[in-house]
Amino acid sequence: MEYTPQQVAEWMVQEIRFKGNLYQTDAIQYVREHFGEEFVFVNENGNASLSKEVKKAFRKLHGGRIAWDRDSFMWAWT
């Protein structure tokens, strides 16, 4: 099955609504296993990150209700 960045972003928002937060490492692992490697890339620091398309769809979906916690490497409901 082919997935879209929108579907990945929707999963992320649902996870955060349900759990209250989502750690980046957990998101990367789940996205790789369930949506596919094409939504993950290695950034300039050598760390796995979600694709720009997923991040863009994610920002549109949550409309500022989810914040990135830089210290904990997680997103959380605000």
Image (cartoon, rainbow, N blue to C red):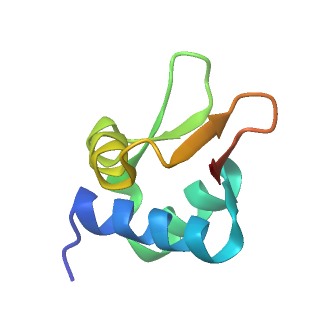
Identify the residue shown where x is 28% and y is 46%.
60
Report the number of discs.
Answer: 0
Q: Nearer the viewer, residue 72 or 26?
A: 72
Image point (59%, 59%), residue name: 27
* Left or right, 31 with reference to 48: left
Q: Is residue 17 above or below residue 73?
A: below
Reply above or below: 71 against 35. above
Q: Residue at x 26, y 42 (%)?
A: 53
Q: Image quadrant of residue 56? A: top left
Which quadrant is the N terminus positioned in? bottom left
Is the residue 71 above or below the residue 5 in the image?
A: above
Residue 58, horizontal then vertical, whole percent: 36, 50
Q: Position of residue 50 (x, y in %)?
A: 45, 44
Q: Quadrant of residue 41?
A: top left
Query: Which residue lies most toward the top here?
Result: 44
Q: Residue at 36% across / 52% down in the picture?
A: 39
Q: x and y percent of residue 12 in the render?
A: 48, 63
Residue 43, relative to residue 22: is it above or below? Answer: above
Residue situated in front as seen by the camera: 30 or 63: 63
Left or right of residue 27, residue 25 in this image: right
The extreme bottom residue here reads 1
Instruction: Find the residue positioned furthest to the right.
Output: 71
Left or right, 75 with reference to 50:
right
